[in-house]
Every structure is written in structure tokens, then in C-alpha cells.
Amino acid sequence: MISKINVQDKFLQIIDYWNPRIGGELNDSYVKMAKIKGEFIWHHHDHEDEMFFVWKGRLLIRLRDGEIAVNEGEFVIIPKGVEHQPIAEEEVHLLLIEPKTTLNTGNVVNERTVSIPQRI
């Protein structure tokens, strides 16, 4: 069945930070949604690029050789293998499109790793 998704309604269902949820599926990828605030861990993804689309707020991505500010309505793609650290001084709402096997913490597995995201 084909159905449309109201992004704002989905974000209203997310009440915690750094815990991506599945908003939809596209081929072999998930459309993930997450609210974030504060600093995440330094990490990289060995086998996949990572796209951060800022729906609301302002995201800072630290790289080892600089940083990128991503504002509402913008997205950035971090190539596989590039170490990065997402930071949100205020609450940020993100859309991520990535392969179903992608871990949110990339090459690091710790208490922030979400192995099986929940659907919203």
C-alpha cells in the first residue's frame, strides 16, 4: 500500500535524543528520523556514506580537518571512511537515508549504538 508520511507528525512521536527511528523504507535503505541535542561520539562508517538532512535546527559536523554547519533545509553527505562528530547546541531534527545495515555509531559500538531501530 502506498501512503504519504507527515514528517512533522513523525517527529512529534520522538521523545528522546540520539535514538534514530525508521520513518520509511526505500529499496535497501531506511529513511531514519532522529532528534539530537549535545555532542555525539567521533566515528566513521567503513562501507557507507551518511547523509544528514536538517529538517529543523542547526547541525555542526566536526571533521578532523574542519567543520561544516548545516542549517534547516540543507543536507550534507559524509563519505565512507571519514571520521566525524555531529553536534547540536539546540535540538535538531534529522532525516537520514542510509542502508539498513548502517549503525548510527559506525565503527564504534557502545551504549549509544542502536542495532535495530524502532518504527514510528
Image: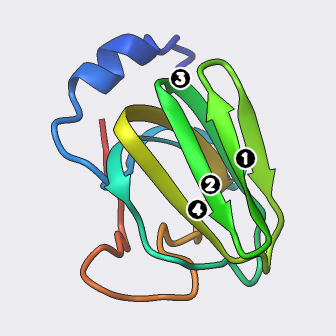
Marks 2 and 3, the one that precedes in the sequence: 3
| Above or below: residue 47 compared with residue 62 | below
Quarter of the image holding residue 39?
A: bottom left
First reached walking from the N terminus: tag 4 or tag 1: 1
Cα–Cα gap, marks 1 and 2: 27 Å
Question: 114 left or right of 56?
Answer: left
Classify 10 Å Cα crowding around label 3: few (below 14), some (14-19), many (20 and above): many
Disc 3: which residue = 55
Question: Between residues 87 and 5, which one lies in front from this camera angle?
Answer: 87
Q: Residue at x 83, y 65 (%)?
A: 79
Q: Earlier in the sequence, mark 1 or mark 3?
A: 1
Image position of 95 (left or right of 75): left
- Mark 1 or mark 2: which comes first in sequence? 1
The residue to which callout 4 is attached is 100
Callout 4: 10 Å neighbours few (<14), some, many (20+)?
A: some
Residue that badge 1 annotates: 27
Front-lying residue, 8 or 3: 8
In the image, residue 38 lies at what x, y percent? 32, 53
> What is the C-alpha distance between the residues marked 4 and 1?
9 Å
- Kindly identify which residue carries mark 2: 61
Q: How is the image coloured?
A: rainbow
Camera-side mark, 1 or 2: 2
Which residue appears at 34% of the width and 69% of the height? Answer: 114
Which mark is in front, 4 or 1? 4
